[in-house]
Amino acid sequence: MPRTISIRFYEELNDFLPPQRRKITFSHTFMGTPAIKDVIEAIGIPHTEVDMILVNGESVGFGYRPDEGDRVSVYPVFESLDISGVSHLRPNPLRIIRFIVDVHLGKLARYLRMLGFDTLYRNDYEDNQIISIAAAEKRIILTRDIGILKNNAVTHGYWIRSQIPLEQLKEVVRRFDLIRNQYPVMRCMECNSVIEVAEKDHIAHRLKERTRQYFNEFFVCPGCRRIYWKGSHFERMLKMIERLRNDRQDGSIY
């Protein structure tokens, strides 16, 4: 027998819905006795984006099986509201923030590494590899593919809304409060390794003449051997970080 429920999604969960279903209560009909998690994902919302579900005013878990006439309210991750008295559906936050990004987010990976965050990226990762690595290494999946986040094995993930790399960075910074959690390490933007201080004399033969003339402090990546110094790119990084800190006031990092 088909069953019909009334359901509403709140705040950024509406990003996943067609315009006619956003910020309203609408009817949804389904067959059988699926869990509420399956119903929500069938509508288009990954479970990793959901933090609380109320059915007829009562908190339920993902395993609840909705019945005819149920009134369902679905809420996203709460940043400040205390919901300790209800079923908190997302796992506890990861103690160390590290990411793995899908094949569409290479520039975002470079930006996150620039801020010092351990971020895995390869342009040939398959979805199953991303999921297994994230589970094994306790990494947060960042993706433009909603389907990845619907996999039951995924516990921590975020769907990137924007297609513009700098806007993507702003999304991630806001969602995970990265400015407050910024790590005091410098990472290679190419391979993700933590770079090390290098003696100028040891790498002088690899430097261009003007770089050798005007700079004395250098770093080298132990992974890919790329050389870094505090030039214009370093100044741009500091300015970007400062703009990210001020983002709450003007809504832009440009």
Image (cartoon, rainbow, N blue to C red):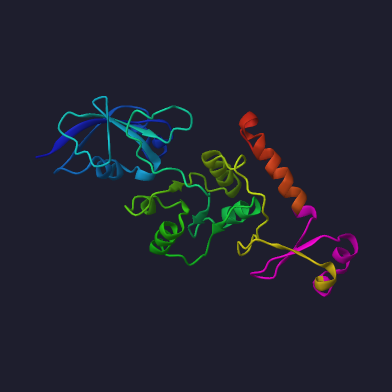
On the image, which quarter does residue 213 sit in? bottom right
Residue located at (89% from left, 60% from top): 214
Which residue is situated farthest in the left direction here?
1
Is residue 132 shown to the viewer in this render? yes
Which residue is situated farthest in the bottom direction here?
205
Q: In this view, does 66 lie above or below 189?
A: above
Q: Would residue 217 be counted in the magenta stretch?
A: yes
Which residue is situated farthest in the top direction here?
57
Instruction: From the top left corner, tell me how far across and down residue 253 is, in percent.
Output: 65, 39
Instruction: From the top left corner, tell me how far across and down residue 120 is, in percent.
Output: 53, 60
**Does residue 185 appear to the left or right of 89 in the view shown?**
right
Instruction: From the top left corner, tell me how far across and down residue 59 is, in percent.
Output: 28, 30
Q: Quadrant of the N terminus?
A: top left
Which residue is situated farthest in the right direction here?
213
Stretch in magenta: 204-233
Q: Would residue 221 be counted in the magenta stretch?
A: yes
Q: Is residue 222 above or below residue 36?
A: below
Q: Quadrant of the C terminus?
A: top right
The front one of 245 and 208 is 245
Residue located at (33% from left, 43% from top): 44
Is residue 46 shown to the viewer in this render? no
Q: How many marks?
A: 0
Residue located at (42% from left, 43% from top): 92
Instruction: From the top left corner, tell me how far across and down residue 18 is, in percent.
Output: 36, 38
